[in-house]
Image: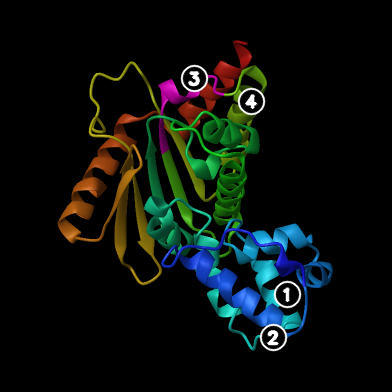
Amino acid sequence: MDDEVQQPECEVGAGMLCVFGRQLKLFRERAGMDRARLGSLTGYSASTIASFEQGRRIPSPKFVDRADEVLDAGGVLSTSKEEVARAQYPAFFRDAARFEAEAVVLHVYATQAVPGLLQTEGYARTVFAIWSPQLDEEVIEQRLAARLARQEILDRRPAPHLSFVIEEAVLLRPLGGESVWRGQLEQLLLIEEKRNVEVQVMPLSRQQHAGLAGPFTLMELKDGHRIAYAEVQGDSRVHTERQKVRELERTCGSLRAQASTPAESRLLIEELLGER
């Protein structure tokens, strides 16, 4: 078997990807397959199968289901699909990603960059490429794929209600250069046309501002639970305590009142595009 060429194995306790990788290898060997054979049956190279088994790459849900089928794993691999998918995200965001995927109402206040749910591929790639400390290329690709996959919420049915308040300074910052910047602004105009989405810009000229404590996200789930998420410098927290969530709900209400209306915000974005 191709396993004779050894690669570094996952460390004990290294996480869900390593657990899945060990299970995948166990079922593959039980089925008497080498990596090349499993790869041919699932549409991947032997080296990619090795990366999956060693926890170095994140398999797609489609691969997990197909591997479970061809290896006759009896659902053992497929049942870990959601946990494996969440491993796409940095550890500090995984809980928030789970709640976001279930949200029926989502309010986002953004101060540094266009919210991930609204980013174009080029803009998102730029964000990860200029991240400090620097990310490996493989990590960039994983996080890019995960961010774009999150955007499925925009077209989910039944449609969730999504609102965004974005600082004007974010729209003035040409991350990625002229072409990427223009593409991102055009994307905002396209998304804003969706009936379940509201985009508001917080003008730099405002003399009253309720959001000086920083960005945050509010989420309401199907069962009525309300959750808040705040993040700064990779340090994040999911808030479920009612008092804290209420405080941020009041802040969100003030921000939406202080920001330009969706119609005014659209005109501002169009003006930015027309000025260059």
Amino acid beneath label 2: Arg
- Which of discs 2 and 3 lies nearer the camera? The answer is 2
Of the two numbered discs 1 and 3 on the same chain, state the one appearing first in sequence.
1
The residue that label 4 is drawn on is 180
Q: Nearer the viewer, mark 1 or mark 3?
A: 1
Q: Which mark is residue 30?
A: 2
Amino acid identity at mark 4? Val
Q: Looking at the figure, which quarter contains the N terminus?
A: bottom right
Q: Nearer the viewer, residue 210 or 234?
A: 234
Instruction: Identify the residue under disc 1.
Output: 66
Return the residue at label 3.
173
Q: Which corner quadrant of the image does residue 254 belong to? A: top left
**How far apart are labels 2 and 1 at the CA level?**
16 Å
**For the point 19% across and 60% down, which residue is it?**
242
For marks 2 and 3, the one nearer the N-term is: 2
- In primary-sequence order, the first of circles 1 and 4 is 1
Q: Position of residue 255 (x, y in %)?
A: 30, 35
Between the C-alphas of marks 3 and 4, the distance is: 11 Å
Judging depth in this view, the residue of 110 and 98 nearest the camera is 98
Q: Residue 9 location in percent, x, y?
A: 55, 63
Q: CA distance from mark 2 to mark 4?
A: 48 Å
Please say if the residues under marks 2 and 1 sit with CB atoms less than 8 Å apart: no
Tell me the number on the disc at residue 241: none
Check disc 3 and report its element: helix, strand or loop. Answer: loop
- Front residue (pair 223, 136): 136
Say few, some or many: other residues with alpha carbon within 10 Å of mark 3 (under 14 / 14 to 19 / 20 or more): few
The answer to whether the residues at label 3 and label 4 have Cβ atoms under 8 Å apart is: no
Residue at disc 2, secondary structure:
helix
Sequence order check: which comes first, mark 3 or mark 4?
3
| Residue at x 56% of width, y 45% of height | 139
> Which region shows up in magenta?
165-175
